[in-house]
Amino acid sequence: MVIEEHARLEIILPDGRFFRVSEDSIIQNSLSVSSQCVNGNTFEIGSVASSVLSAKFRLETEIISHFDVHGAKIVLFSWFGENPPENNGQRGVFWVTSATKKADIFMVSAIDSITWLDSSVFVDNGTGGLVNAIHQRLNTNIISAADIFNIIVGEIAGLPVGESLQGLEKQQLIPNATSVFKGFGYSETDGFDIRLPLLLDDEQSDNIRDYVAWIAEYMGGFVTADENGAIKFNLFENAWNNIPETLDFSEFQQDTLEISGFSLFVEYAKVITENKTYRHAYYFDTIRHPGFEMPENSIKIGAVIENNPFVEFIYSYYNQLGEGDLFPIVEALEAYLQWIRICPFSGTYHGNHYLHLGQYIKIKDRNGNFHETTITGITWKFRGGQQIKCIGEDSRTLSQAAGIQTYARDANPRKTQQKKRSQAVRVGERMKTQINRLETKVMGNKNNSDSEIGGIKEKLESIDSYLDEHNNRLWELEIRDFQIQIDELRARIEQLENGG
């Protein structure tokens, strides 16, 4: 079977000049887009990752340098078959972060609109001071997680919001998106207000993406930019009331399909607060749908939410009222998570349609066996297939904190320093928050007894000790493992040099 695929690019420079790049001007095997909905190699919720476009193309003009292309807006179009679909095959909107030029050929790298979440949450309060814009907007009343997502993305970040959280009925299918949860076999009649998040004003992070990730984690999904550049919340497709698309091994490039002999099963959801209060919900606590079966050959894992300020502060609020029970939060999460199929695999798929992140699929191997799984990463190459995978290996690597230069979303360039925080940095900031609160308690309450103050000092020392251990762990993960890899490579090189 011959698969016909077409592509083109539209480029808008920061000064407003427009260029259309036909597929004939795209250098062969150079156009690709990589995207993921899980960071690293272990299953997690709350990912907010940019898709990256790479391309080489020819622009036959003498008046454009590679400097002019920095910050340019690129719209990608691609489709299968002779004629484009109704939307002309629009696949995404990207902004150039790096560009080089040789003769009339440009090589560019660009990222999607997720990058615009990498800006400061602090704004001028009108008197020369800075305030947390999200807290300022949310501290008037307690609202739903779905509304908070829309406010952070739409009002605070100033980006278009995808249609994934439109309508109360749809929101109630998403864990913790509203006070009432009616998804995956549940049918609640009473609300649980503890599912409505709260944010206090002493949260340390100043990065909007952090808050989007926290609220996405709270609702059990991930965040992407859609084909029009809108920021969209997504749930993982799953085995509850869904029929997976079947991919046959014959549709994969030869010798690329690898499927593990095991699967992962999210056995429980757990929330841990900063004072180490926690709540579990196991799949047998929440299963209310007949016919549920845990996948065979499963390795049991859990989804753990920790250091999440939206959970932290709503729990503190209701705990003061004597109603601080976290179980409704984890119960809703596990009711959904238990249905996600996670069978690690990788392969290059050649089909006549595009797959998407979080998609629930069934792969038929060469022996006729079926494997249910979920797509967590895709690298599409123009006329080169779709490299798809589902994670399942724990490499113990940390998310990288990277600073990049990007530009304004309109035609006028505006450089901004980007701050993508790793989980390690977020943990450190939460520790700072705890220390600040404890110090405030000591200084603000002069009637504390010596024993109370001693207990608080002991708590501070414990936190300091934790930070020291955390820094040692960072060294162990970031330096020691790399040194081991370097030593192994050196030993291998010596073997090769000696004919081994």
Image: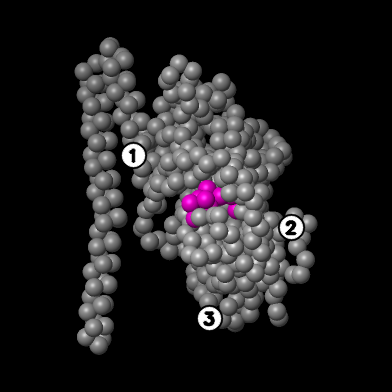
Mark 3 Cα-neighbour bin, 10 Å: few <14, some 14–19, many ≥20: few
> Which one is nearer the viewer's eye here, 203 or 438?
203
* Vertical position of residue 312 compared to residue 287: above or below: above
Q: Position of residue 79 (x, y in %)?
A: 70, 64
Q: Answer yes or no: is residue 134 visible.
A: yes
In the rendered view, does 129 fall on the left or right side of 238?
left
Instruction: Indicate the quadrant where residue 484 lies.
Output: bottom left
Residue pointed to by mark 2: 88
Q: Is disc 1 in contact with disc 3, using a CB cutoff of under 8 Å?
A: no
Q: Amino acid at mark 1?
A: Gly
Q: Residue at x 40, y 61 (%)?
A: 394
Q: Residue furthest front?
A: 62
In the rendered view, does 404 fall on the left or right side of 446?
right
Magenta segment, which residues? Answer: 66-74
> Which one is nearer the viewer's eye here, 236 or 233?
233
Q: Residue at x 59, y 31 (%)?
A: 155
Q: Position of residue 11 (x, y in %)?
A: 61, 53
Q: Is disc 3 in contact with disc 2, using a CB cutoff of under 8 Å?
A: no
Residue pointed to by mark 3: 255
Q: Residue at x 76, y 60 (%)?
A: 85
Q: SS at mark 3?
A: loop
Residue pointed to by mark 1: 428
Q: CA distance from mark 2 to mark 1?
A: 46 Å
Q: CA distance from mark 3 to mark 2?
A: 34 Å
> Which one is nearer the viewer's eye here, 371 or 479?
479
